[in-house]
Amino acid sequence: MNQQNPRSFRNRAQAVFPMLRLRYWLVVGGLLVWVTLIISKLFWLQIVRHKEFVEKAQKQQLHTFEVAPRRGVLYDRHLRELAMTVQSDSVWAIPSEIDDKPSTVHALAQIVHDAHGNSIIDNWTSEQQIAARVNASHGFAWIARRVTPEVAARVRALNLKGVYLQKEFQRFYPDNEIAAQVLGYVGVDDDGLGGLERKFDARLHGQPGRVSAAVDARRHVLGSTVQEPEPGENLVLSIDENIQFLAERALDQAMQRTRAANGTVVIQDVHTGQILALAVRPTFNPNDFRHTTPALLRNHAVSDVYEPGSTFKLVTYAAALDQHIVTPDDKIDCQGGAITFNGRTIHDDKSDHYGVITVHEALEHSSDVAAVKLALRMGPDHFYEYIHNFGFGSRSGMELPGETRGLLRPPPKWGSTSIGSIAIGQEVAVTPLQLVSMVSTIANGGVYLPPHIVMTAQPKPETANGIPSQPTPPPVAQPFDPGADLPNPLPTGAHRVISTMAAAQMRKMMEGVVLYGTGKQAQLNGYSSGGKTGTAQKIDPATHKYSKTMHVASFAGIAPVNSPVIAVAVVLDDPKGGGVSYYGGAASAPVFTQVAQATLEYLGVPHDVEVRTIHAPAKAPAEKDVEPEQEHTGDVSALMAAVNDLPSDDPLREAVDGARADAAAPTVIKVKATAPQKPEPEKSKTTAAADSKPKPDTSSTPETVAVALSANTVKVPSLIGMPVRQVVEQVAIAGLILQVDGRGLVRSQEPAAGSAVKPGTPVVVHCAR
């Protein structure tokens, strides 16, 4: 065997070793590069893109659903629900699970959409619309939202694959049309779209909750976490549901009697400014607002203006008395019914040729000449200050949306004769809400109180980490208690307008208007009342001239005069039917009578005058008992131009801008003015003198009304089986005081039906469902 040469081996080893060392370092270098790339990739994935992948993982592994909160309740002052939230079924589908989409969609459309193409749920449930949503989605598609129980039962009976039902909250108005313009309505996504629902949407809506569920790759639920929704706040309104019903019932009868285009009745507590009732006609059902028209959604009490005419003379006389220019018994020369100043002549009615009469007689006969003289003695600056302090020309701060400030130009923009026109209610435009606040100011002793319709909001409890530390306190009922004192301290925005003495003098003069002047049909039975009638002629927005055929009849009054409790404003737009005169004394004053009488009886206000037995039906007012005609003295162009000075968000400004942009709808603006000098003759007039107390209109009341037995007794009507609202009506007509125990239908009553009792006797009814 040959031995290797050690030197040769060593030489070969020395030759191979550098190659091994190179390979070693190549392997080490490769490993370092590989490790570096892995670390870089891990850094990129776990550090740089960590948040992105976490979000992706959560989307894949967690399903989050929003849980709608329960919307807050709207209560009346007695905590009766006016707007509440209930649960209803909604129909939805997973399109990927539906085998035959066309037949499924067709079957569903037949149930949720009627044969005439008008949805019974909303306006997006036709077969084509459902098919579009189903075909556009893979995982979820709505079929119909908040369906009726009958529709839900029919869908459930089909047992269609991929079609499901789930519970959703739905807004419900248990009284249907009652106070519809005040409450507003809620859309399909639970957003407030009108009235208080819109104004306080953020507070009523609440905060939605969330449910998060973890699932595995096979979509099995591994666990879930729940964040409970936070319900919305509850609001207590100043409205009394029963008084609201009385106002709406009277307005319905007036609309039927006069065939007016629209009407408004506002009832206010004179000592707090709270609105007890606000009725608007025509109206709508907020449970079915989708099938109404935009015109029915409008709140005429706060959004529309008109030239008030003779009712505005209350401001003129009140300012003159407060300035000590005159007293009610001072003499004033009406100059035979005409006055000329700055080249313009203003006349009283053609049948009025009064000479020297007392100031209170001038108001009773609604003399234009006397009102102009008083304004001229004051001067424009002082007169404007009183007008503004009474709340005209500015927003009241009412909680309802869409309030206009009306039209009132400052004195520098008045014409040479504007002071005379404004003194008789021309060249100024007001809302029914401003009108009732003005008479409330006179009634409570001369202090203007801003009107309000929301009393309190249910306070939210303190929370710790989003969890309430204590249960939400329940709302508190605040029944209306007729008082005689103003709040102390006065609320924000309240201020004195006229002195206590001037207010007392005005109340007696307003009582004279009802007893001896143009407002005789506003007399009450057992209560003193005072007020002022007004007849206005509308301005045609197409021609900017006064119309000879369209009028507005109004009455603003208080009761009782000796210790006022309520103020009422009644405005009827364009009454022209049923043989009823368009004058305020004939069309609107009877509405005041019906509303004020029933409201005072319901509240249990003690009678302050003798209760009379009514035997004969009411007669139409004599010609001398209606407010006189007024000639056109106002500058219509200047009044219309005043709209340009309103803020851009004023609804009246928006209406004018819309009318300019769309000439096809020129009647959006409702600016009105007093009647012309030569009006068209009335279709029906009578020369018979009106009775001192007209009989209330009972043409639509049931036959169970109380029958007068003598001057001092009445028969108690039978109330068994009646709902509370009908009971309120019957007891008010009988001149009795109602006390209700429980809710529902009347099961028993005391005294018994047919009993002879004195007017003002309490009647206790026990109700049960």
Image (cartoon, grey):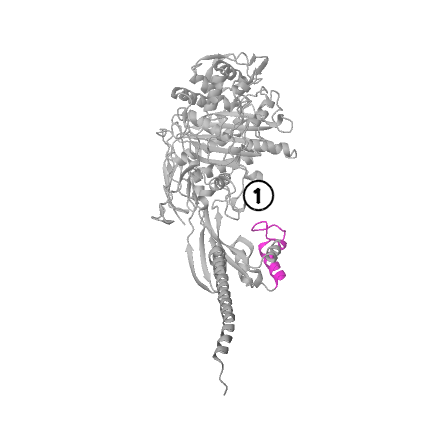
Q: Nearer the viewer, residue 364 or 501?
A: 501
Query: Is any atom of residue 619 visible in this view?
Result: no
Q: Is residue 754 above or below residue 215?
A: above
Q: Is residue 46 visible?
A: yes
Q: Which residues are magenta?
A: 100-128
Q: Classify residue 701 as left or right of residue 736.
A: right
Q: What is the tally of numbered marks visible in this picture? A: 1
In the image, residue 280 lies at what x, y percent?
52, 36
Q: Residue furthest bottom?
A: 1
Q: Is residue 384 above or below residue 284?
A: above
Task: Give the residue type at disc 1.
Answer: Thr
Vertical side of 459 occupied by 619: above or below:
above
For this orientation, the residue located farthest to the left is: 470
Quarter of the image where one finds residue 685: top right
Residue 485, position in %: x, y? 35, 28
Q: Nearer the viewer, residue 636 or 415?
A: 415
Task: Decide which of 17, 386 is in the foreground and name it.
Answer: 17
Residue 231, given in percent of the width and then of the height, sits at 42, 48
Q: Is residue 126 magenta?
A: yes
Q: Nearer the viewer, residue 60 or 513?
A: 60
Magenta stretch contains residue 513: no
Counting other residues with Cα less than 10 Å from the Cα at mark 1, is it few (<14), some (14-19), or many (20 or more)?
few
**Circle 1 sits on which residue?**
292
Secondary structure under tag 1 reads loop
In the image, is 234 to the left or to the right of 251?
A: left
Q: Position of residue 421 (x, y in %)?
A: 55, 19
Residue 309 falls in image quadrant: top right
